[in-house]
Image (spheres, helix red, strand yellow):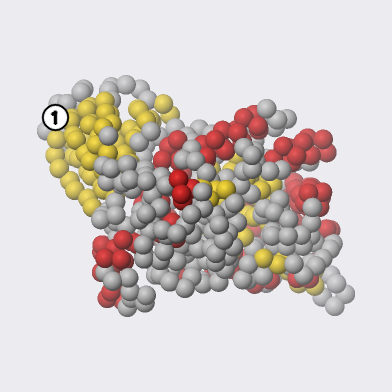
Amino acid sequence: MITNITVSTHATGETIRPFWKKLTTAGRAAEGLREDWRNHLREVQREIGFEYIRFHGIFHDDMMIYHEDKEGNPYYNWQYYDSLVDFLLEVGIRPIMELSFTPSLLKSGEATVFWWKGNITPPKDHSKWAGMVQAMVRHSIDRYGLDEVLHWYFEVWNEAYLKNLFWSGDQADYFKLYRVTAEAIKAVDARLPVGGPASSGFEDGEGPWIKDFLAFCAAEHVPVDFVSIHPYPNKWPFDGALGKNIMGYRGKDSTFEDLSWLRKTVDESPFPNLELHLTEWNSSPSPRDLVHDTAFMAPFIVYNHVRCLGLVDSLGFWTFTDVFEEGGAGDTLFHGGFGMINVLGLKKASYYGYWFLAQLGTECLARGEDYIVTRKNGRLQILMWNYAFYTEAMQNGDRSKLSLLSRDGIFEDPGERTFEIHLPDLTGRMKVLEYRFDREHGSAFDAWLRNGALPYPDARELAILQQQAVPSSAISLHEGGAFQRTISLAPHGVMLVELVPTP
């Protein structure tokens, strides 16, 4: 298949917002106290540079925040909280602060979620919950300044729609928690952004609780500044912590369809100007989906972000690291974890999906199903991809061709895609920078397979894998006049060609 990319470099393009750099995510707050987690985030910020991060469990017991004296009066310990937030701001990233889960001293029941047992019951005393939230906000303002904290977001809970998974109450219980929390935050400063309902993936073409939530806020005059939801592109998505049950995949454009519905629904609501933050998203919500390690993830990420330009304010990839313990630690080096970086620091295909997007400019000259051309500071970026989607069997839940060491038979084979690039009115001398990702160039999982799939590589072996798990790159000179180039990409391939004016 051939794609022709003919672009006039004299044309004025469309201004775009690089929403792919708005938000990344992590598993839980306490993992952010670990040095390997922090090293991974330092690298992400150095090479990609996200604006915000979101995670579970800021009020979970392992953050040691909430306490009561013998008379039941609350008091707080901010040492771990300060350590985490200090670090985040140090590396140039701000929190979308998900307010969860219930501290043991405030729980109304014993129901928990995850290996680390986040309590999912409504607080038994909403006034103490509100006091804790207010204390956190006031402490943050005291430490970091109001001007800083006004840039944060406060998201109430996580996926309360999934009863007895993330919330033991019903919708009315969640709406009560939302009201109490939002009003507590706004009592500190009405400009602080608060939102929800952080509901789960789409059902029958609609996002659960979104319409009900907006109607509740309008009818009850409850403040809301943003809507959040998690548009995983799956059917029967909750396949268990160890990936044992059936999970299918919706169509190639399901994310675009979900976000289009959300944009339209909010635009037609009493709150048409709300920001839309998709605070979790990945190819699936399973922490043991072996797809997450494959080269498929790079074009999956690039395609969906380019396709969804202009629809939402953020699409937060869940998560930036495999230092993640919802189901306990992964039992193999490539166990299907969510992360862009695996536990030993190897950058997976998803990392490079975001790295490629981060190179794009804010002026779009052209885009199509498998390419986008942008410009910034006189430099031109031509990004191309060959997105091979799942087979029909895989979409319908047949995972028989998916195993630890064999993950090829689950994707369609569209063959190589050829791109004919033509910039007819290019003038001046240019450096041409080229970066290529595919299974042979940059896929850490495929490099691991080629080198014997070692379960526990030592330092020297890990260095070999790190050297191989990077895209190929090249520099050449174009001496002026029209630019033409023919490029072929294998399935799962992504390639960036950047033209840089040079004397």
- Secondary structure, mark 1, is loop
Q: Which sits in the foreground, 137 or 348?
A: 348
Image quarter of residue 70: bottom right
Left or right? Give the position of 148 relative to 251.
right
* Within-10-Å neighbours for mark 1: few <14, some 14–19, many 20+: few
Q: Residue 349: image x %, image y %?
A: 37, 54
Question: In this orientation, does residue 51 appear?
Answer: no
Q: Which residue is mark 1?
A: 480
Q: Is residue 501 toward the left or the right of residue 266 in the image? A: left
Up-down: is 159 above or below 313? below
Q: Nearer the viewer, residue 268 or 37?
A: 268
Please name whichever residue, 174 or 429, is drawn nearer the observer in this view of the structure: 174
Say which residue appears at 73% left-offset and 62% top-offset.
120
Query: What amino acid is labelled 1 in the image?
Result: Gly
Picture mark count: 1
Quick one: 347 or 255, which is closer to the camera? Answer: 255
In the picture provided, is 2 more to the left or to the right than 93?
left
Q: Relative to 445, is 208 above or below?
A: above
Q: Residue at x 17, y 26 (%)?
A: 482
Q: Looking at the image, can residue 7 be seen?
A: yes
